[in-house]
Image (spheres, helix red, strand yellow):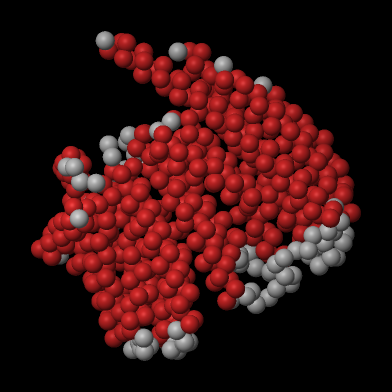
Amino acid sequence: MPENRLQRTGIALAALGTLGAVLLLWMVFFWVPTERTLGIAQRIFYVHVPSAWIAFFAFGIVALCSGVYLWLRDERLDMAALAAAEGGMVFCTIMLLTGPLWARVSWGTWWTWEPRLVLTLLLWFVYFSYFLVRNATENPDQGKRFAAVVGIVGVLDIPLIHVSVTWMRSLHPQPVVLRPDGLSLDPDMFITLMVGLATATMLFLGLFLMRYTVECLKREVDQRRTGSRAAQGA
Amino acid sequence: MDYLRVIWTVARKDLLIEMRTRERIAAMGAFVVLVGVLFNYSIDTAIVRPQEIAPGIIWMTIILGGLLGIGRTFHLEEEDGAFSGVLQTPIPLDALYLGKTAANLVILSLVTVLIFLVFGVFFGLSFGSHPFVLLAVVFHALLGFVGLTTLFSAMSARTTMGESLLPVLVFPLLVPMVIFGVSATSRLFAGRPLSEVAGSVRMLGAFAILSVGAGAMLFRHVVEE
Amino acid sequence: MTIRTCLLVAAILAVSSPELLAQGTDLASQTLGRAYWHVFAAYAIGWIMVLGWVISIARRLVSVERALKGS
């Protein structure tokens, strides 16, 4: 069964990702040098940035699958979009929760209207709308189409939102800046960051495949149920 | 030319209905005046000059009032399943969308004029010395707003949550409109040189094209059965 | 198989946490040690969210496999 192969690939990737996460923990706490100005708290960087990367990468998958789903109406694309949306939501939430922890140390406040944070907050709401709309229709096929539309409009608007919040930020620099935005990365820090990115990507892809498999099996159960109900009715 | 005629027919129908019933305009009009009153009490004029925050409260009122009215765009067609009848006709669905958007734009423009008048009177505002540029700013922003909201209004009308879903769907996407709209408006009010406003007008234009284009392409996926 | 993966993950966490705690007290004595709990919270959030998703997927997988066997 193709689902078994996907399941095995998913588990393999997730296991690799878990090992990567353990390696990352070791690197973050034992190996990478401490940043001069911000000290220990700068290590949040290595979980914050990879989560942001995955949140946007996942949304790219959602938008692509949604677009092709509306065009080809292939259920598998919708299932992939759903799985990616769940993963994207998870990592988006991680980014939004670690962001204020980072901002508190960097800038002295829990929330700053920093363009990346704002963009991620809005992305979170687009994900939220995706799920809300999907589950708010009586006809599930309609729900899938609506969610796909939300995904597509979201991906079209996200670059424009990015431009606007960045432009706004350039006009109103933060009054108290303990450290400028662009961190000059030490090579060791760069390696740690890359490990973080690789870990997050593997975890996401592995769990994405698992979630996709679950959805495939769910559809099969539904098909069997409608098949047996039709047979009973006949 | 048929295509344009369809758009005109749909827009004209909606505007005629609105002129006769005045449902949406009345609600939106009352809303903006009353919001003006509430805003007056939410600002401490000893600390803040209304002229300084006027662009912000004007644009928020446009958005909230607009949502109120545009949320009901498809209300008539949803009643008694009339929309199925509309779908039976051979009109291209994107023309239907553009007609609805055009009608909403006209209605919202009227409400926006009312907002500027009422807030101008309530807060003693001066609108700067470039009315046509202000008009361009407002037009582009409204077009983008109406484009997005009409699409999502069709969607929310078909969900169990109805109109309450609309703000959640639309607000994140309106951030560029608010940023560039408020920035351009406040610079115009403050009498700043036009070169500072040009960029915002261009971005609002991009926003409008994006909204209406996306809406026209995706509308059929929202309404088909 | 997924339950085994979960157990593997939990075991790794259990093994690595004493080391982390030990290192923690050393690092906490540095001047910016007050921000140390931020770092802990950030990584805890990361682990909890991802594990939460893993558990949610595992539960759904178990229930759908049970439904498939039943039908």
Residue B18 sits in quarter? bottom left
Q: Nearer the viewer, residue A52 or B121?
A: A52
Residue A72 sits in quarter? top left
Classify C54 as above or below C46: above
- The percent coordinates of residue B73 (x first, y second) are 24, 55
- The percent coordinates of residue A10 (x first, y second) are 64, 29
At 13% across and 65% down in the image, what residue appears? Answer: B19
Q: Nearer the viewer, residue A195 or B60?
A: A195
- The percent coordinates of residue A71 (x first, y second) are 40, 38
Residue C60 seen from this side = no
- Residue furthest to the left in view is B20
Is B12 placed left or right of B183 in the picture? Answer: left
- Residue furthest to the front in view is B1
Is B159 placed left or right of A100 in the picture? Answer: left
- The percent coordinates of residue A192 (x first, y second) are 80, 49
At 40% across and 39% down in the image, what residue appears? Answer: A70
Placement of the N terminus of chain C among the 4 image quadrants:
top right
Placement of the C terminus of chain C among the 4 image quadrants:
top left
